[in-house]
Each structure stands twice: as structure tokens, then as C-alpha cells.
Amino acid sequence: MAGRYETPEPFKVDIPERLLIDLDERLRRWRQPVAIADNGSWASGTDPDFLADLVDYWRHGYDWQRCQEAINRWPNYLVDIGPQRLHFVREPGTEVEGAPRPLPLVVTHGWPGSMVEFLHILEPLAHPERHGGDPLDAFDVIVPSLPGYGFSGPPAREDGSIGPIGPRAIADLWHRLVHECLNYRRPYGVQGGDWGSVVSSWCAFDHPAKDEKEEWRSGVLGLHLNMVGLRPGIDLRTATLSDAEKAWLHKVQSERDEKTAYQRIQATRPQTLGVALADSPVGLAAWIVEKFQAWSDCAGDPLKCFSMDRLLDNIMVYWLTGTAGTATWLYRGASEQKPRGLPDGTRVETPTGFAAFPADLAPPPPKEWMERIYNLRRYTAMPRGGHFAALEEPDLLVDDIRAFFRPLRFGAAND
């Protein structure tokens, strides 16, 4: 790693033309596989006809410069925290004279997403008055790229070696980013779905804004989630569950083999899979776009939720940065983390809000299950939307984030 950034260093995305030329050559020469005849149902994976259309648009209609400019519109930074290089966007929120300063909010993506998921909600969160909202709801928005993803460096262990790390270790990096690198001395919020929900939950568990004496410190004031991936500190064999919890667990477990095979591959053989994902842009696109189809509220057609530009913006961040392989390491890191779930008899005591989008990868858990894991203050059953909430239903997500944090803001001490 050339040089070190002890403090956040301004950064601009500037992809060399040679990488775009190389991509076009690979797309021009891609070999279409023999297709299973399942009438475009996606039942066997990415629909070959959809993929062919996507590649054709990629070659002849897609403009990376548009996406690059959209990223560079915001203040981007690189910083080194120990051996880990992190990329993040930080947009300071609108300040109102005589009111508390905007609440810092760390928004975290997951797999197969990236920070580009949040580009179009940055302004509504940081500057609500520009979108018909109340400036008192403004956040200082911080959007990091997970280690191994996008413009962050590959995952680095504490000893400096390159290798998988788990979501709890990433949560510590997030706290250090806010507290040490950005020098916030007031409480902050965290938000996430997918891996972002797990990282954010560990951040709230390990770094709450109130200590054991109920005194304020720089830590997590509130936790907002649009997916749950943290394991509760209970023994399912002996726990007394409600009927709703039993029905939910039965549905989740019955669908596990069908929906989570990718997790086992990425947790056990990420190095092998990474070779294919790093060498074939079309293979990478097929691996990712299938999840956008299966996990969104699109009635089987991803173009009902996402434009081809949106799909390709996200894929391009993986391809152009060469991080398609290292991104999957998080699954190995999570499997190696001890403990993987909350310690027995504990829960996240930080006030928590949950936006339950109905078409997620797994059906949203019932309120009772959430209360086993979190100090649940708000549970919103959304009328529509799926896994990629910031892309599918940005207004619903932003409104729920604002509403959840609104009553928490005024208990936080200012800098």
C-alpha cells in the first residue's frame, strides 16, 4: 500500500481508460452458455435472455462517466485505520441556528450492494429542506465502503495480514472512523441492511452512547435496520416462542437451501469463486443480477425495480476496482468470528427501529423476535419493497429513518 493516510484524505474516483477498453474487449468476446429451457423464469439462475440484453446495453448504451461523476459529486475520502484502508463519503448536514447540530449517521451497505446504493438518498438525509422536509431532521451522512469492497482496501487483520475479517471487527473500524478519524464527540446513529445490518448491530452493542452508569459518551445513540442478520442470544431448542415466531422460523428454514446456497460457497471457497468473478465481467454480472431479481419486489422482472444503468453502476464498482473476490471474504470472516451471534442472555440495548420490507431475501421477522435481539422502539411494516430498500423505495426508507431518530436527537450532547 503506497503511503498512509493517518487522517482522511480527499479522494476522487478516476478509472483509467485502459480498464474500460479491457472491459469492452471482454464483453465483446463473452461466450454464452447453453441455456436450460425454463421459459425465462430465473428458476435455474440468471435468465440467459436478460443477461444477453444486459451485456448488449453494457457495451452500447452504458456510460461509466455518468456514474463516476455521480460518486464524485460528494466528498469522498480515504483513511487508514490500523492496517485497514477505508473509503467513505461524508456529507455534512444542514445546520439550523439555535438547534442541535445534525446527527452523524453511518449508513452501511451489504453484498452484493455497494455505496452507490445510497447516492440518491444522501441529499434527502443531509439536506431534507431541499426535498420538502424539515432541516431539523438533517444528518451528517457517512457512507463507508466495507473492507474488500469498492474503493476500500482488502480486508486486513489486526496483525496486518490480508484475510477475511468479521462484521464485529468492521463495527470497531466504524466506531474508530467516527470517533478518532472524524473527531465526533457526540453520539451518532447507524443504519443498514444485509451485512450493513449486522455491522451496525455490533456497533450498537459494543459502542452504545450510554455507559453502564447511564452517562453519555461518543457512541451509538440509535440503530435503524431494514434487515436483521444478527443471531439472538437464546437457545432455540429450549426457548418459548410465539406462534408468529414459530411460523416465521419454519418459513425461513424451509427456504434456506434454495435461497442461501451462495452463502455457503462464499463462506467456504471464496478464493476459488473469486477467480471467476475477477476474470469474467459477464460471470460477475450474472452472479450479482440474479440476487437483484430474487430479493426485490419486482414480480420476477428486475427492470420493474431497477434500470439497467442502476444494475450496471453497482456491478461496475465491483469490476473496475477488482473487488468481486475480496467482497465475498466477509462470509468467511463471519463464519470464523467467535461468537457469531450475541452472547447468551444479552440483547442490543441501544434504541432500535426496524423497517420491515415484505419482499426481502427472507421474510421480515415478527416484532416478538426483534424484541429478543433489540431494544425495539419502532417497527414499521412497509407496504412494498425488498432487500435493496434505498434503491427500490427510497422515500419510504428515508421517511422511516427520519421518524425513528427524531425523538432521539435531543438527548445527545453537542460537540
Image (cartoon, rainbow, N blue to C red):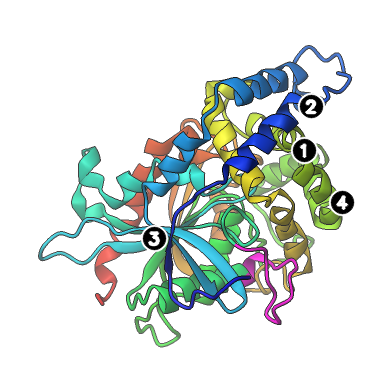
User: Are the residues at dot 1 and dot 3 in contact (C-beta closer than 8 Å)?
Assistant: no
Q: Name the residue carrying label 4.
A: 272
Name the mark nearer the viewer: 2 or 4: 2
Q: Name the residue carrying label 2.
A: 30
Q: What element carries label 4?
A: helix
Compare marks 3 and 4 and give the one earlier in the sequence.
Answer: 3
Give the quadrant of the N terminus: bottom right
Residue 105 marker: 3
Question: Looking at this rendering, what residue extends furthest in the front direction?
Answer: 18
**Looking at the image, which residue is at 25% across and 49% down?**
127
Number of numbered discs: 4
Residue 362 x, y percent position in the rendering: 66, 41
Segment tinted magenta in the rendering: 153-169
Q: Could you tell me how far apart the alpha carbons at marks 1 and 3 are, in whole angstroms?
A: 36 Å
Q: What's the residue type where badge 4 is placed?
A: Thr
Residue 370 x, y percent position in the rendering: 56, 55
Q: What element carries label 1?
A: loop
**Looking at the image, which residue is at 63% across and 24% down?**
59
User: Are the residues at dot 4 and dot 1 in contact (C-beta closer than 8 Å)?
Assistant: no
Q: What's the residue type where badge 3 is placed?
A: Leu
Residue 111 marker: none
Compare marks 2 and 1 and give the one earlier in the sequence.
Answer: 2
Compare marks 2 and 3 and give the one earlier in the sequence.
Answer: 2
**Residue 369 to residue 7: above or below:** above
Q: Is residue 402 left or right of residue 288?
A: left
